């Protein structure tokens, strides 16, 4: 009987220990991911990886701390798909004060399980703007040609009235997408419609009053406290958040993603392209050195990759390519600077049209482009001057350097004559008989034999 009670007591103790370890292991944790700046492929990759990591780590909630002017439509949709498929609740928090969730950020905010904003923040202006301008496009920037609705557009602040059929198609697609997200999360549909069609925006207090967001909080701990006990839907199940006292883990992107994000800076892309052009130009004008050509090719490839990540205007890309071709042609064609100057002007005009100016963070300023143009002209002039100077420089090696050199006959006999010229022993021939020790001057080079004459007979 005692053994039975003892076994029962041990089982009870083990059960309590297991329950205690389970409770201890279920301590809430919040993973905070910063989404700052332009939303591009690097941002989408970072967010998707962190959502997967949150699932593996058993995090209670993921907080996207956002401050963005917008970004590429394809990257935005990739982030939204990851949020909708996430088994961990996602809260998008527009923070710090003064931040915004404009354009693509509004879509991500609507898609999240919890939408929150800090005081003095705003959201909205979600009208899609085409970024592949071409002749014949309308005033919204939509190209006249056909394009994939998932590529070459982004949510941005531009009027959606009028325009071509393609622009209306893009606006209708974006409007339906944001309405569907509003219906899924139970958020205000009217503002979703106006944000896309009228580029409407709201402050944090207005968004809370309109039912666009759920919470206004000063910081992440306040947000976690405010959403504690809130019910959110994960797929077909409803989950109650338990976030009070959660351990906060802030995750920063690695150096690879930071590098990819930096390449999306249009100014860096232009600088890389110019370095690539300078390197190839120098290699073409002074072949054989190797380093400028290799560095130029690497920088040019990086620039092309950066342009692929940017919402580029292909007219600008064509002008930049034309400018680069003209500047490189200056190394081969005696245009007396016409190709070089034309290339610099084409490059500057291409920079003006290169990046969609509707998003200020992606624009290229006039002073920056003017500085690049002046630097390009100065660099081309310097490289051209060095190349011209090297062509005018006297020969420092080769057969031509031997002509006119003097030497001394070392061997004279029936088998031929030899003379020391420039510290080397050469077979020599002469119209006159040569004597050992006689001073001679090189008149011509014929293969490995020097045609010489006695210095006494040379006219000085």
Image (cartoon, grey):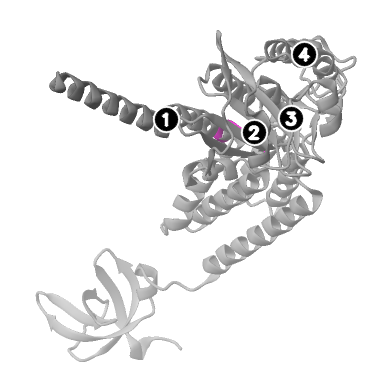
Task: Indicate which disc residue 215 carries.
Answer: 3
Q: Earlier in the sequence, mark 4 or mark 1?
A: 1
Task: Indicate which disc residue 175 carries.
Answer: 4
Q: Is residue 154 above or below residue 367?
A: above
Q: Residues within 10 Å of mark 2 (few under 14, many from 20)?
A: many
383 magenta-colored:
no
> Depth-wise, is mark 1 or mark 3 nearer the camera?
1
Q: Distance between the Cα atoms at labels 4 and 3?
A: 24 Å
Q: What x and y, as percent, mark residue 281? A: 55, 52
* Mark 2, secondary structure of its residue: loop
Q: Earlier in the sequence, mark 2 or mark 4?
A: 2
On the question of residue 153 being in view, the answer is: no
Pointer 1 residue: 23
- The front one of 196 and 132 is 196
Q: Distance between the Cα atoms at labels 2 and 4?
A: 19 Å
Q: What x and y, as percent, mark residue 154? A: 71, 25
Q: What x and y, as percent, mark residue 255? A: 48, 47
Q: Residue at x 55, y 49 (%)?
A: 276
Q: Do labels 4 and 1 touch, CB within 8 Å? A: no
């Amino acid at each position: 009987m005692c053994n039975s009670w003892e076994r029962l007591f041990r089982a009870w103790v083990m059960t309590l220990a297991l329950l205690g370890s389970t409770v201890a292991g279920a301590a809430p944790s919040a993973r905070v991911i910063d989404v700052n700046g332009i939303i591009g492929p690097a941002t989408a990759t970072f967010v998707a990886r962190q959502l997967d990591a949150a699932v593996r780590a058993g995090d209670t909630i993921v907080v996207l701390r956002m401050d963005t002017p917008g970004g590429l439509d394809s990257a935005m949709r990739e982030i939204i798909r990851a949020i909708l498929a996430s088994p961990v609740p996602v809260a998008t928090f527009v923070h710090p004060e003064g931040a915004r969730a404009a354009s693509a950020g509004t879509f991500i905010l609507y898609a999240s399980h919890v939408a929150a904003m800090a005081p003095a923040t705003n959201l909205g202006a979600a009208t899609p703007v085409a970024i592949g301008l071409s002749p014949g496009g309308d005033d919204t920037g939509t190209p006249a040609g056909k394009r994939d609705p998932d590529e070459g557009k982004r949510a941005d602040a531009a009027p959606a009235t009028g325009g071509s059929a393609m622009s209306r198609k893009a606006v209708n697609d974006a409007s339906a997408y944001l309405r569907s997200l509003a219906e899924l999360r139970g958020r205000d549909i009217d503002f979703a419609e106006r944000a896309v069609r009228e580029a409407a925006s709201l402050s944090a207090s207005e968004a809370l009053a309109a039912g666009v967001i759920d919470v206004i909080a000063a910081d992440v701990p306040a947000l976690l406290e405010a959403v504690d006990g809130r019910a959110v839907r994960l797929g077909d199940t409803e989950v109650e958040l338990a976030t009070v006292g959660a351990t906060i883990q802030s995750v920063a992107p690695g150096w690879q993603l930071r590098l990819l994000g930096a390449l999306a800076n249009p100014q860096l892309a232009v600088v890389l392209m110019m370095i690539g052009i300078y390197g190839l130009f120098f290699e073409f004008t002074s072949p054989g050195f190797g380093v400028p050509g290799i560095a130029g090719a690497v920088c040019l490839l990086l620039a092309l990759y950066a342009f692929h990540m940017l919402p580029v205007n292909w007219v600008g890309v064509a002008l930049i390519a034309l400018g680069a071709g003209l500047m490189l042609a200056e190394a081969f064609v005696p245009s007396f600077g016409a190709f070089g100057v034309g290339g610099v002007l084409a490059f500057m005009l291409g920079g003006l049209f290169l990046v969609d100016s509707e998003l200020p963070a992606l624009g290229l300023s006039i002073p920056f482009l003017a500085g690049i143009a002046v630097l390009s002209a100065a660099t081309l002039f310097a490289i051209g001057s060095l190349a011209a100077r090297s062509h005018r420089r006297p020969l420092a090696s080769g057969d031509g350097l031997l002509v006119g050199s003097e030497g001394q006959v070392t061997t004279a006999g029936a088998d031929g004559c030899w003379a020391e010229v420039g510290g080397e022993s050469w077979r020599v021939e002469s119209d006159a008989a040569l004597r050992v020790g006689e001073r001679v001057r090189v008149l011509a080079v014929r293969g490995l034999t020097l045609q010489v004459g006695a210095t006494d007979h040379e006219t000085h």
